[in-house]
Image (tube, rainbow, N blue to C red):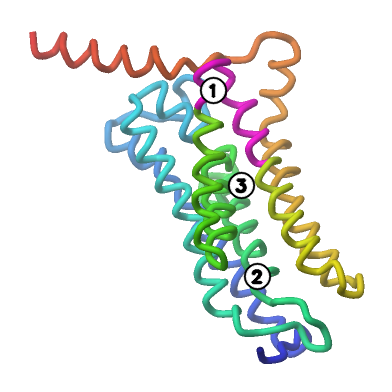
């Protein structure tokens, strides 16, 4: 492991933030909708994200949207890990990649939620956050990908049963944050608590805070009993029925 100086290499963090944010700004939901001569922000809930795309265009388009948005977060995390995995912050035993993975991932999520190219009117950041945690948890310990995939299936099951898509999503981000925080706690339990270590913990927690803030309207509607229901069964049946009708 090589020492890494924050003071000498601060410009790298500026570059990482700009690149990750720019990648996050790419919104596949808007692109797909515009190719169909529609504006996803004027349809359904108005959110240019996976859930709204699924309700409006079917589960296949929704899945494509999810995969692309998750890829945005995942690729930023993977590149940051590969570049900094052999470095430790100078004078500490803290891995630089533990910080940069979530640093880049966070800016990718911010780009999705607050894209400057769309006047800061973006999605809720859930799929991108999933991609961040999926890769961040798996790049050092590959079998963790099964844990994250299992958690993802649990989210789908929760949404299928309750039809509360937003609640399932924000609970999932909180669960992923807790899993990573626990891993970091045991990894660094013998380390001296310093600003860098606290920053790592805060970065991980920030995903829960930001995605929950992005869902504040959903939470208010949920508590007042007015939240939109997302029936995955109905969506699949509806699109299957539409295809059969077109063939007839």
* Mark 2 secondary-structure assignment: helix
75 sits left or right of 248 in the view: right
State the residue at coordinates (80%, 57%).
202
- Name the quadrant of the C terminus: top left
Q: State the residue in front, 237 or 178.
A: 178
State the residue at coordinates (67%, 31%).
215
State the residue at coordinates (66%, 89%).
1
In which quarter of the view is residue 234 placed? Answer: top left
Q: Is residue 214 above or below residue 137?
A: above
- Mark closer to the observer (1, 2): 1
Q: x, y (%) of residue 110?
A: 63, 51
Instruction: Give whichever of discs 3 and 2 has the lower sequence position.
Output: 2
Q: x, y (%) of residue 157?
A: 51, 25
- Using the image, tell me which numbered label, if any, was put on residue 159: 1
Q: State the residue in front, 7 or 77.
A: 77
Q: x, y (%) of residue 129?
A: 58, 48
| Residue bounds of the magenta highlight | 157-173
24 sits left or right of 245 in the view: right
Q: Are marks 1 and 2 in contact (CB under 8 Å)?
A: no
- Is residue 163 found inside the magenta-colored segment of the image? yes
- Using the image, tell me which numbered label, if any, was put on residue 114: 3
Q: Is residue 63 above or below residue 81?
A: above
State the residue at coordinates (60%, 33%).
169
Instruction: Give me the C-alpha separation between circle 3 and circle 1.
Output: 26 Å
Q: State the residue in front, 209 or 204.
A: 204
215 sits left or right of 29 in the view: right
Q: In the rendered image, which residue does mark 2 sit on?
A: 100
């Amino acid at each position: 492991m090589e020492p890494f100086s924050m003071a000498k290499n601060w410009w790298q963090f500026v570059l990482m933030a700009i690149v990750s944010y720019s990648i996050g700004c790419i919104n596949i939901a808007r692109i797909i909708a515009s190719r169909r001569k529609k504006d996803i922000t004027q349809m359904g809930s108005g959110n240019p994200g996976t859930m709204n795309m699924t309700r409006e265009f079917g589960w296949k388009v929704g899945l494509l949207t999810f995969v692309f948005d998750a890829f945005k977060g995942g690729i930023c995390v993977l590149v940051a890990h590969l570049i900094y995995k052999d470095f430790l912050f100078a004078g500490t035993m803290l891995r630089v990649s533990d910080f940069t993975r979530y640093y880049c991932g966070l800016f990718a999520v911010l780009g999705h939620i607050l894209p400057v190219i769309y006047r800061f009117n973006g999605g809720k950041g859930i799929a991108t956050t999933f991609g961040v945690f999926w890769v961040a948890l798996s790049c050092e310990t590959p079998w963790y990908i099964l844990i994250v995939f299992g958690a993802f299936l649990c989210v789908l099951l929760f949404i299928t049963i309750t039809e509360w898509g937003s609640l399932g999503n924000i609970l999932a981000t909180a669960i992923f944050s807790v899993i990573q925080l626990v891993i970091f706690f045991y990894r660094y339990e013998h380390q001296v608590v310093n600003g860098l270590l606290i920053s790592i913990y805060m970065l991980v927690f920030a995903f829960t805070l930001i995605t929950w803030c992005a869902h504040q309207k959903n939470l208010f509607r949920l508590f007042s009993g007015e939240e939109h229901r997302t029936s995955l069964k109905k969506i699949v049946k509806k699109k299957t029925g539409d295809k059969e009708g077109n063939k007839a």
